Amino acid sequence: MNDPTRFDLDERQRAMLAEMGVRVWMPEPSVLQPATAVEPVAVMPTAMVPVQVRPVPPKAPPVAAPTLPAHPPLPAGLADMAWDGLQAAAADCQACGLCAQRVKSVFGMGPVQAQWLVVGDAPGEEESALGQPFAGESGRLLDNMLKAVGLSRTGEGTAGAYVMHATQCPTPDARNPSPDELSACVAYVSRKVALVKPRVILVMGRFAMQSLLQTTEPLGKMRGQVHRYQGVPVVVTYPPAYLLRNQADKAKAWADLCLALKVVQEAA
């Protein structure tokens, strides 16, 4: 029988390992046992259980969007109306939803043949209650601005200014007027310009600017230059309500007034 310490070592290597107390051996080869056959296991078929299919409930019919109230069209012949007919049409106008907010139609005031036409944004509740444009603190500031260039809304001839808004009804909770609401009043604005025949239009506010000039540019970018509406020169400036909150911009508004005054003087 072979020495179990022999592991392809010579006598000298074995002696050294023996002195160190190290035994080296090779594992005995294991005898592989033949694999035992695995008895097949019979798989019993499971009982067939019927699957219950739940009926799919029918889809609910789509909910129709609420029908918005239809607004009657603008009065026929608006583009040819004289002052009395135009004012009566504005008082009964229901061309957009702003009519529900109206106490009185804010038509406009001033001499009907004025060199200056002032157009502001939508009126507020105070204007609607009085039926007059630019009421309260905003109105007082506007009157002072006009006075500074020799004008007033009650003046006549070259000293008069016709004052109005881009819409004739206030907006709910003083929100900004929508493009559709501005569009509904464009025909009134156009007819008033044709009747007044001003030498300059002073547009005070972003939404009045959008209504007349059909632009979405920032108001600050449109200042300091002369635009045109129906052939009439247009100067854009800040609204009085804004100037009450931003005193620093009053100097810019004064520059705009001087530009409008220059346009009128050059057209004389």
Image (cartoon, rainbow, N blue to C red):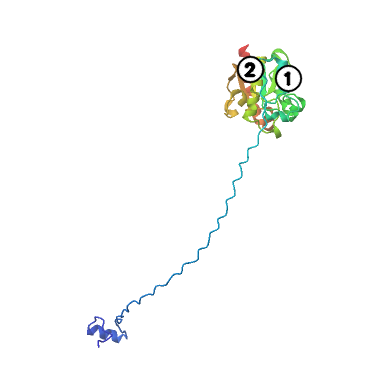
Drawn side of residue 221 relative to residue 116, left or right: left
Drawn side of residue 82 relative to residue 213, left or right: right
Q: Residue furthest right?
A: 130
Residue drawn at point x = 61 percent, y = 21 percent: 235
Q: Residue furthest bottom?
A: 1
Q: Nearer the viewer, mark 1 or mark 2?
A: 1
Q: Which residue is mark 1?
A: 88
Q: Is residue 205 something one can see in this rendering?
A: no
Q: In terms of secondary structure, where does tag 1 sit? A: helix
Q: Which quadrant, please, contains the N terminus?
A: bottom left
Amino acid of disc 2 = Val
Number of marks in picture: 2
Query: Residue 6: x, y in percent?
Result: 26, 84
Residue drawn at point x = 65 percent, y = 25 percent: 184
Query: Residue 243: x, y in percent?
Result: 67, 29
Q: Point out which mark residue 155 bears.
A: none
Tell me which corner region of the image, top left, top right, bottom left or bottom right, holds residue 199: top right
Contact between labelled residues 2 and 1, with CB atoms less than 8 Å apart: no
Drawn side of residue 17 relative to residue 262, left or right: left
Q: Nearer the viewer, residue 38 or 210?
A: 38
Amino acid of disc 1 = Ala
Q: Earlier in the sequence, mark 1 or mark 2?
A: 1
Q: Residues within 10 Å of mark 2 (few under 14, many from 20)?
A: many
Q: Point out which mark residue 200 bears.
A: 2
Q: Residues within 10 Å of mark 1 (few under 14, many from 20)?
A: few
Q: Nearer the viewer, residue 160 or 206?
A: 206
Q: Nearer the viewer, residue 187 or 146?
A: 187
Q: In terms of secondary structure, where does tag 2 sit? A: strand
Residue drawn at point x = 73 percent, y = 14 percent: 156
